[in-house]
Amino acid sequence: MADKKRAFSGIQSTGKLTLGNYLGALKQHVSFQDTYDAIFCVVNLHSITVRQDPKELMDNTYDCVAWYLACGLDPKKAILFAQSHVRAHAELSWVLSTFTQVGELERMTQYKDKSKQHKQNVNAGLLTYPTLMAADILLYNTDVVPVGDDQKQHIELTRNVAERFNGIYGEKFIVPEHYHPPVAARVKDLAHPERKMSKSLPGKGCVLLEDDPAAVLKKFKKATTDNEDQVRLDAENQPGITNLLEIYAATQGISSDAALSQFKDSRYGDFKVAVGEAVGASLAPVQDEYKRILADRGFMDSVLKDGSARAAEIADAKIAEIYEAVGFIKRG
Ligand code: AQP
């Protein structure tokens, strides 16, 4: 394991996972487990920056674990754990918050969007969210962070904070690279192709991972397109059609150009049905596995227990190194 590069990523337990989470994250994450020393985390500390019902938060956390495992994550190869089980995340987050400028945090697009969406609860955690994310990543000497396109700005901030800290205390942190998938790095909402498909904005254009093939097909049939009557890859002028091509490509494991050559002469109606059927068929076996695993909380608890013990071993060593660097007396 030691000679492998390390990959780290996470998913928030804030709601039902979407096709965007699957194509942009889960499916990618699992592909890292053979070639990387891979660590995946259900980031439930991040989830409470938006008010959560306690039971739903817990259910959603198990849900994320079940999806990870259903997608093929092998807990003997990769580490899977819940963020709240490893205390060093909160500890490093505090240290890093003193190396992050308020102005940098205020510039984050996600902060601006979420503070508009949750006007009644613009809490400090919503602002400092990126320092916790930087801590998540830097604690594990991460080389690469596979995440969707929406997280690019947060990875940039993580790199800046790591470099700033290293500039003062020596090379303590690895400055991580952002990996984003070649296609479907930002899956768009089917009804509103100008915006990201997001689990915090569920609606008729949001495909849930748990949707059965009939429900998936129905959503694709209603996908917003345009009046061009020509299947083309043109994100600016034909965002809906381009999104469908990318979803199909990611689902089939082909390039978007290959998807285009398959559908360039298709009518929109036929095209939407073909993509919807392909997505439904690809999700069905994963859903069966998900249902089986979700029914076994004992198994998920044992995966989380083992995962957090392995994660804490790495994280505790790192936080001890960082505490020493900043001048905190070693715990006797
Ligand atoms: N639409 C998407 N396309 C590609 N990748 C996506 N991801 C999320 N949406 C898409 C990737 O999934 C991982 C986990 O994301 P998250 O839980 O932080 O974000 P979310 O599902 O978008 O969650 P929320 O609660 O709904 O947040 P907001 O409101 O910010 O969108 C990440 O790797 C992410 O890139």
Image (cartoon, rainbow, N blue to C red):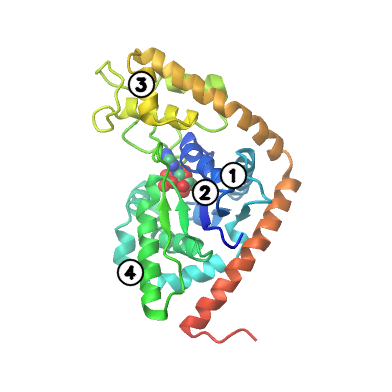
**Residue 14, position in %: x, y?**
52, 46
Residue 39, above or below 273: below
Mark 2, residue position: 11
Ligand 1 within 8 A of label 1's CB?
no
Would you say the residues marked 4 and 3 are in contact, meaning their CB atoms lie under 8 Å apart?
Answer: no
Tell me the CA gap for discs 2 and 1: 7 Å
Whether residues under marks 2 and 3 lie with C-beta atoms below 8 angstroms apart, the answer is no
Residue 264 placement (x, y as % from top left): 33, 18
Circle 2/circle 1 CB separation < 8 Å: yes
Front: mark 3 or 1: 3
Residue shown at 70%/39% (left/top)? 293
* Label annotation for residue 64: 1
Mark 2 is on which residue type?
Ile
> Which comes before the other along the chain, label 4 or label 3?
4
Figure disc tally: 4
Instruction: Tell me: 13 left or right of 296.
Output: left
Distance CA(mark 4)–CA(mark 1): 32 Å
**Amino acid identity at mark 1:** Cys
Q: Residues within 10 Å of mark 2 (few under 14, many from 20)?
A: many
Is the residue at mark 4 in contact range of ligand 1, meaning its CB lies under 8 Å from it?
Answer: no
Q: Nearer the viewer, mark 2 or mark 3?
A: 3
x, y (%) of residue 241?
A: 33, 25
**Label 3: few (<14), some or many (≥20) within 10 Å?**
few
Residue closest to the eye, 5 or 52: 5
Q: CA distance from mark 2 to mark 4?
A: 25 Å
On the image, numbered disc 3 is attached to which residue?
261
Q: Secondary structure at mark 3?
A: helix
Amino acid bearing label 4: Gln
Asked whether mark 2 lies closer than 8 Å to ligand 1, one says: yes
What residue is at 54 percent from the left and 54 percent from the top? 43
Quadrant that contains the N terminus: bottom right
Q: Mark 2 or mark 4, which has the lower sequence index? A: 2
